[in-house]
Image (tube, rainbow, N blue to C red):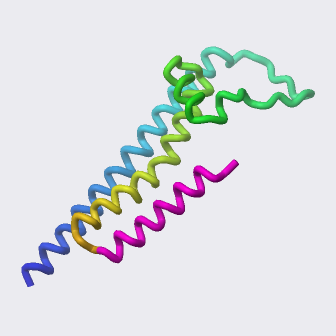
Amino acid sequence: MRMEAASRQARHQLEMQLGTLLRLGVSMAAAVVLIGGALYLSRHGMDRPAYHTFHSGPSDLRTLAGIFEGAVHLREREVIQFGLVLLIATPIARVAFSVFAFFHERDWLYVGISALVLALLLYGLTSAV
């Protein structure tokens, strides 16, 4: 009986930690996107868009290295893109945290399932061209 209560308490604590991780990740991503949006509007808010020709986005926005470098230099588009990268990374961090938490609890079935989900997420992110 005591083991069941301890297990239930450990699960509840895990769920609370995962919830905190998700809230922090989404809040950080929103703050970064808000800062990037404010920078963009302060620098380009009065620009007139030219809709008669298509202009592709900068190539720096297509790689993580370009996004990080631009965000460090406070380039507004890269800061916004970095916020979106944080938003995408949040649920991935949740799955990675779950793998370690289930490993710590020695719940091997959920370790395997979480590791498989994490592998599929990482494969999907790295193989997309």
The spot of residue 83 in percent (x, y) is 52, 36
Among the 4 quarters of the image, the one containing residue 70: top right
Please say whether residue 70 is one of the residues in the magenta stretch.
no
Q: In this view, does 121 lie to the left or right of 9?
A: right
Q: Is residue 80 left or right of residue 13?
A: right
Q: Residue at x 62, y 22 (%)?
A: 40
The spot of residue 57 in percent (x, y) is 74, 30
Among the 4 quarters of the image, the one containing residue 106: bottom left
Q: Which residue is drawn at 52% across and 28% down?
A: 68
Q: Which residue is drawn at 71% across and 29% down?
A: 59
* Nearest to the observer: residue 49 or residue 14: 14
- The range drawn in magenta is 108-129
| Above or below: residue 65 compared with residue 44 | below
Q: Quadrant of the N terminus?
A: bottom left
| Above or below: residue 105 compared with residue 109 | above
The spot of residue 114 in percent (x, y) is 41, 67
From this viewpoint, which residue is outermost toward the bottom? Answer: 1
From this viewpoint, which residue is outermost toward the right? Answer: 52
* Nearest to the observer: residue 97 or residue 55: 97
Q: Residue at x 38, y 56 (%)?
A: 96
Among the 4 quarters of the image, the one containing residue 105: bottom left
Please say whether residue 114 is one of the residues in the magenta stretch.
yes
Q: How many marks?
A: 0
The spot of residue 111 in percent (x, y) is 34, 69
What secondary structure do most residues of the magenta stretch adopt? helix
| Above or below: residue 83 compared with residue 8 | above
* Nearest to the observer: residue 83 or residue 121: 121
